[in-house]
Amino acid sequence: EAISVIQPRVVCLEHNHSYPPPQEWIMPYDPNFRWDCNSSAYGASLVALEKLARRKGMVLVGCGLYSANGFYVREDLVNDAFSPPFTPERFFNPLDYQKIVSFPPRAAGDAKPSNSHPFKIIGGFVKIKTKQLLKQILGKSN
């Protein structure tokens, strides 16, 4: 909210999946806050971040496949490159840990499965999809 000196073309914001649309939630600021992995009290919902982005002239154009990332493009650059509606309800992808863990390794490109950390198998795939989305946003062919 406090950033006002730049107008980026693309922004990637991580949202809290515990609050799906239409829920709007923002973690109150607490300078003594310490993250607790057993709590859903952190960050902000996709709806809250989408509203903030709109106030900043950004449009939600998509979310990561199995991630908590929302991709926003500056309003004047959206044009016909993306299809409306640009809503959290359209783009929100609920986290499904079973799908993430069972994601086929071959779909992950060069990523190798890891017995020590099953989430590593999707790393390459997520990077490829994110790279494709950013190319589309920036209008580049490579």
Image (cartoon, rainbow, N blue to C red):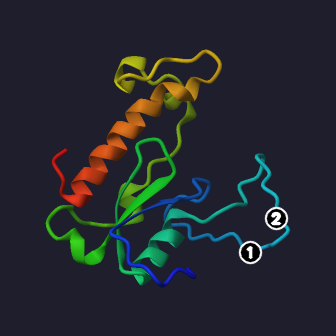
In the rendered image, the vertical position of residue 74 relative to residue 17, given as above or below: below
The amino acid type, in three-letter code, at marker 2 is: Phe
Q: In the drawing, what numbered circle is on residue 29?
A: 1
Q: Residue at (36%, 80%) from the top-left corner?
A: 57
Neighbor class of circle 2 (other Cα within 10 Å; few <14, some 14-19, many 20+) is few
Is the residue under label 1 in contact with that under label 2 (CB below 8 Å)?
yes
Across and down, in percent, residue 56 comes to: 42, 81
The amino acid type, in three-letter code, at marker 1 is: Tyr
Across and down, in percent, residue 23 comes to: 55, 67
Q: Would you say 16 lies left or right of 67 here?
A: right
Location of residue 7 (image quadrant)? bottom left
Q: Residue at (55%, 59%) from the top-left corner?
A: 15
In the rendered image, the vertical position of residue 49 relative to residue 70, given as above or below: below
Q: Residue at (24%, 59%) from the top-left corner?
A: 138
* Residue identifier under label 2: 33
Q: What element carries label 2?
A: loop
Across and down, in percent, residue 44 comes to: 60, 66
Across and down, in percent, residue 64 comes to: 41, 48
